[in-house]
Amino acid sequence: GGNGYTDTGVASGHEITGVTISGSEINAGVYEGKLEPSGAVIKAGEKDVTSHYEITYVPGTLEIVKRGGEGVTLNVNGYNGEYDAAAHSVSNETVTGAVEGTVWKYQYRKSESDSWSDTKPMFTDVTEATVYVKASNANYEDLKTSATVTITQKPIEVYAEATRTYNGADQTLEITAAGQQTGKTVVSGETLTLNGAKITGKNAGEYVVLDGGNDNYTWN
């Protein structure tokens, strides 16, 4: 009942005025027989009539429910940057508002239909992906949030230069590799090719081609 115990068999006009209940736990769960009642006092008005009773004490169940999400927040940082050939993901997973010292388990997935995984998804190539994050602790309801990982194309400058002398006919310069790269360059350790792009022209002048097969770069 509201006083933490129930009683049966007390005579009319008599009242249990106090019971000592011992037993405690910290973590959420159901603990059968954990609560031990003792020391009941029964009175008729102001008169103590406890001695008129043979009292049987029955241990009770202690239930500690999980704490809900109210006031407890899962925080996660996304990522936004240019392609750099490194792996990136969400970061700085923290929970605020929980009891100090609470240890959380973080899990991840790339869509709401995927199963949760202990492994954080990592992204290297150009993408815009949502990462879903869950924080779990046995004493709390699960906390969930999401953040975005955005990797944009890296702008580079590609120069391919050659000179031909006018001869009245179409002339072709076939480019099989990136020319000199200055200023904005490809990531160290990577090679960029131009897929056999061609420049064709007849009359004197300048001809420019920007062509390639790597979606992690954009040509300027």
Image (tube, rainbow, N blue to C red):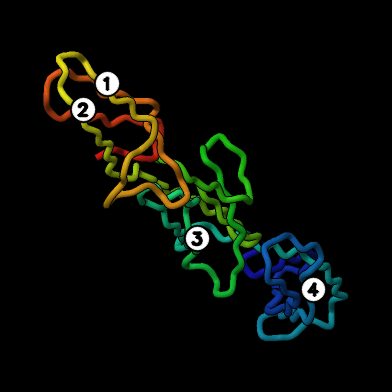
What residue did someone put label 2 on?
164
Considering only vertical position in the picture, is 68 above or below 13?
above
Q: For the image shown, how many numbered marks are present on the structure?
A: 4
Q: Is residue 198 left or right of residue 93?
A: left
Residue at horizontal 25%, vertical 29%? 209
What residue did someone put label 1 on?
172
Labels 1, 2: front one: 2
What residue did someone put label 3 on?
93
Considering only vertical position in the picture, is 207 above or below 182?
above
What residue did someone put label 4 on?
36
Alpha carbon of mark 4 to alpha carbon of mark 2: how far? 100 Å
Alpha carbon of mark 3 to alpha carbon of mark 4: how far? 41 Å
Residue at horizontal 57%, vertical 53%? 142
Callout 3–callout 2 Cβ contact below 8 Å:
no
Callout 3–callout 4 Cβ contact below 8 Å:
no
Instruction: Specify the amino acid type for callout 4.
Output: Glu
Alpha carbon of mark 4 to alpha carbon of mark 1: how far? 96 Å
